[in-house]
Amino acid sequence: MTSLTDIKSRSMTLRRSILSVPAGNARALEKVPGLDCDAFILDLEDSVAQEKKTEARDNLRRFFRQSPRDRSDERPTNRESIIRINPLESEFGRADMDLVLDVAPDVVLIPKVERVAEIQAVADILSEAGAPDTLSIWAMIETPKGVLNAPVIAGADERLKCFVVGLNDLRKETSVLALPGRTYLVPWLMQVVLAGRAYNIDVIDSVFNDFRDAETFDAECAQGRAMGFSGKMLIHPAQIEPANRHFGPDPKAVEEAEAIIAAFAQPEAQSLNVINLDGRMVERLHLVEAEKLVALARSIADRKKAS
Ligand code: COA
Ligand code: MG
C-alpha cells in the first residue's frame, strides 16, 4: 500500500510548457536558463534558414558547454533539453545527429514523422553510438500521413516518449482554415491524443502563432487541457505562465485527490475496490489518477523551491 507521504515524495517529468527556441538566435538562447518553461526545444529545423544551419549547430555546442547538465533522470524536477533535428534524409539530418551524439540532450525531436522507419532510423543511430537509454525520441505529427499513421508510429520504439502536434504544417497541407475553436481540426487532434495514450506516451499540443493575443491563447490552452494534451509547444516567453497554469493541476482537484488517497489508506478500505467518499462513488482506478495528480503537484512545488 502506498501512503500519501510516499506519493508526495515521487517526482514526475513536467511537460506543461515546451518552448521552441531557434538555434540560430543567440540572443534567445541566452534567455533560456532564466525562463520558467518545463522543457525547451532547440530548433535546427523550420526556424533556421538553410545557410544558417552550421552556425546554429555551433551555437548549440556552445550552449551545452555553458549550461550545467540538467538530466531529467537524475534530477526529475529539472527541465528536459530537446534538439529538433532536420529530417534524417535531408542534407542536414546526419550532421544534426552528430551534434546530438556530441552534446547529449535529453531528447531528439524528429519533424514531420510519417512512418515507423523514421523513428527506427534515429533509434538505430543512437543505439549504435552507445547513447544511453535515457536519451529519448519525440516525434512531430504534422502531416496528413503522420496523423493517419499515428497509431502505429506510437509503438515504434522504446525510446519514443512523446508526440508533438504541429498545426502550421498540417493546415498548410490540408487547407483547413484557422477558425476559432479549431473546429475542423479537433477530430485529428483527438486521434493523435488517443494514439499516444494507447502507448503510454505524452502528447503536446501545437504552437499558437499570435503571441500577443493572450485571450485566445488562454482559451486554446484550456481547450488543449480538456482534450487530454499534457502541455503545449510555445514560441514566446509570454506564453509560459498561461501554459503552466492551464496544464498544471487545479488546487481543488489536488485536495480531492489527497482525500481519495487518504480514504483508500484507511485499514477498513484495504480489501475494497470501491468506497463511499462523502456521497460519491470512488473506485481504485480513481486512486491511480489521484496519485498521479498529487505527484504532479509535488513536482511543480519542487520546481518552485529549486528556482
Ligand atoms: N525563446 C527565448 N527567448 C525569446 C523567444 C523564444 N522563443 N522569443 C522571444 N524571446 C525573447 C526575445 O529575444 C526578447 O528578448 P529581449 O527583449 O531581451 O531582446 C523578448 O523575448 C521579447 O521578444 P519580442 O520582442 O516580443 O519578440 P521577438 O520579435 O524578439 O521574437 C519571434 C518573436 C516570433 C521571432 C520569436 O518569438 C521566435 O523566434 N519564436 C520561436 C519561433 C520558433 O521556434 N519556430 C519554430 C517552431 S513553430
Ligand atoms: Mg513543422
Image (spheres, rainbow, N blue to C red):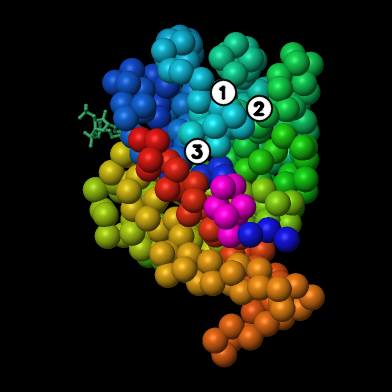
Q: Which quadrant, please, contains the N terminus?
A: bottom right
Label placed on residue 105 = 1
Ligand 1 rendered quadrant: top left
Tell me which residue sits at (35%, 35%) in the image: 307
Residue 5 magenta-drawn? yes
Which residue is drawn at the image coordinates 51% and 29% (left, top)?
81
Instruction: Tell me which corner region of the image, top left, top right, bottom left or bottom right, holds residue 265.
Output: bottom right
**How far apart, in angstroms, are the residues tagged by discs 3 and 1?**
16 Å
Which residue corresponds to mark 3?
77
Q: Is residue 219 left or right of residue 261?
A: left
Marks 1 and 2, the one that precedes in the sequence = 1
Q: Residue at x 77, y 45 (%)?
A: 155
Q: Which residue is mark 2?
A: 135
Q: Is residue 188 above or below residue 22?
A: below
Q: Magenta stretch mostly in which secondary structure?
A: helix
Quadrant housing residue 131 = top right
Q: Give the CA separation, mark 1 to mark 2.
A: 7 Å
Mark 2: which amino acid? Leu
Task: Report the number of numbered marks.
Answer: 3
Q: Nearer the viewer, mark 3 or mark 2?
A: 3
For mark 3, give the secondary structure: loop
Is the C-beta separation of discs 1 and 2 under 8 Å?
Answer: yes
Q: Secondary structure at mark 2?
A: loop
Work out whether 1 lies above or below 61: below
Q: Residue furthest front?
A: 267
On the question of residue 205 being in view, the answer is no
Give the residues in magenta: 4-10
Q: Amino acid at mark 1?
A: Pro
Along the viewing direction, whichever of 56 and 251 lies nearer the viewer: 251
Give the camera-side residue of 192 and 268: 268
Rendered location of residue 300, percent (x, y): 44, 48
- At horizontal 40% and vertical 36% (from top left) the residue drawn is 306
